[in-house]
Image: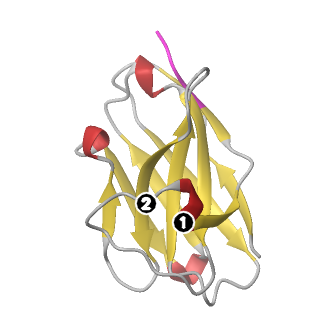
Amino acid sequence: QVQLEETGGGSVQPGGFLRLSCRAVGDTTNINYMGWFRQAPGSEREVVAHASTRSASARTADSLRGRFYISQDNAQKTTYLAMDKLKPEDTAMYYCAAGCAGRYTGFVRSPGESDFCDWGQGTQVTVTS
């Protein structure tokens, strides 16, 4: 089990930029992928992006591609989510998640929540003028 510490949330105007960070604490040896999810009030949690810890493979959800970018720094055990051209509808709680130890996932499709075993507490992103 790993602990995930998210930082970087906040309030930003439409069109703005934020970068979220997620630092993993603990044994990440067998964690093969990391992900970001978000949940807006009254909505289900949805996947934003996921990235391999073994290669440069990554995938952003179709609706967010071109604005959201996930990246991985294994040396720092940190996963980043860069969010550009933010819109009010991006307002949500953003969660970092670690893949289940020893499990692999592909990057042709976005994974589901059940593909992740450890979750952060979340960081709030609010896009408002």
Q: Amino acid at mark 1?
A: Asp
Boundaries of the magenta span:
125-129
* Above or below: residue 53 compared with residue 60: below
- Return the residue at label 1: 115
Query: Mark 2 Cα within 10 Å, few/some/many (few <14, many 20+)?
Result: many
For the N terminus, give its image quadrant: bottom right
Residue 128 highlighted magenta (yes or no): yes
Residue 97 highlighted magenta (yes or no): no
Which residue ends up furthest to the top in the rendered image?
129
> Majority secondary structure of the magenta segment?
strand
Task: Depth check: give the residue in front, 92 or 13.
Answer: 92
Residue 118 position in % (x across, y down): 70, 65
Mark 2 touching mark 1, by CB under 8 A?
yes
- Return the residue at label 2: 111
Question: In percent of the image, x 58 and y 60: which residue is there?
Answer: 114
Question: In percent of the image, x 52 and y 67: which residue is there?
Answer: 34
From the viewer's perspective, is 9 left or right of 12? right
From the viewer's perspective, is 122 left or right of 17? right
* Above or below: residue 53 compared with residue 80: below
Query: Mark 1 Cα within 10 Å, few/some/many (few <14, many 20+)?
Result: some
Q: CA distance from mark 2 to mark 1?
A: 6 Å
